[in-house]
Image (tube, helix red, strand yellow):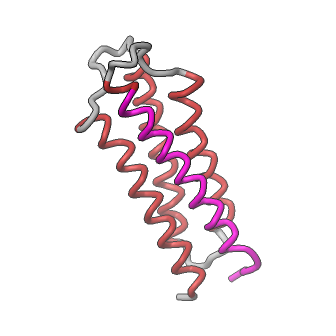
Amino acid sequence: MSPRKKLVSALAGIEIFLCLLALIIPVTLFPVCDSSTHHCRQSYMAICGVAVLVITAAAGSIFSKGIYPARPLSIVTAVGGAMFIVIPSFVIGVCASPMMACHYGDLPVWNLCGGAVIILSVVSFLAAKGDVD
C-alpha cells in the first residue's frame, strides 16, 4: 500500500469517526426533542441520512484497491460535510430557545463535525491528485 493510499485511508477513517460522533452525541450527551414536530428532531433525522452517505463514501475510499476512486468520493464526503452545517443551520434549523440542548450542544457539534469533514475531504482530494493506479 502506497503512502498516499495510507493517508487517504486514515483521513477517511477519521471522517467515519466524526460522522459517528455526530450521530451519537445527539442521543447521549445533548438529547434532541422526542416529538417529531420539533426542528431539532427533523434535523437529526436528516443528519442521520447524510452521515450514512458520508460513511459509505469514506468506506469506499478505504476499501478501494487504488487511490483513484478517492478523488470523487472525497467530493461526496465534502458535500456531505457541508450538509452537516447547512441542514441544521439554514434549511430545517433547531429549536428556537437558546436554552434547549439542541441549540447549545447539537448545533455546534454538527457544525464542527461538518467543517472537519470538509477539511479532511479537501486534504484527501489533494493527496489523491496525480496518482492513477
Q: Quadrant of residue 86?
A: top right
44 over 15 or under it: above or below: above
Q: Is residue 73 visible?
A: no
In the displayed structure, does residue 123 sit left or right of residue 42? right
Q: Is residue 63 visible?
A: yes
Residue at point 44%, 13% (across, down): 96
- Is 120 within the magenta? yes
Residue at point 41%, 16% (across, down): 95
- Using the image as rendered, state which of residue 27 and residue 63 is in the foreground: 27
The location of residue 76, given as percent across then percent down, is: 62, 52
- Using the image as rendered, state which of residue 99 and residue 115 is in the foreground: 99
71 over 45 or under it: above or below: below
Give the main secondary structure of the magenta stretch.
helix
- Is 17 within the magenta? no
120 over 98 or under it: above or below: below
Q: Quadrant of residue 131?
A: bottom right
- Using the image as rendered, state which of residue 41 and residue 104 is in the foreground: 104
In the displayed structure, does residue 93 sit left or right of residue 82? left
Q: Read off the magenta span.
A: 104-133
The location of residue 42, given as percent across then percent down, is: 43, 22
The location of residue 53, given as percent across then percent down, is: 51, 47
24 over 119 or under it: above or below: above
Residue at point 47%, 72% (across, down): 10
- Using the image as rendered, state which of residue 111 and residue 129 is in the foreground: 111
In the displayed structure, does residue 54 sit left or right of residue 37? right
Residue at point 52%, 53% (across, down): 116
Question: In what quadrant of the picture does the C terminus appear?
Answer: bottom right
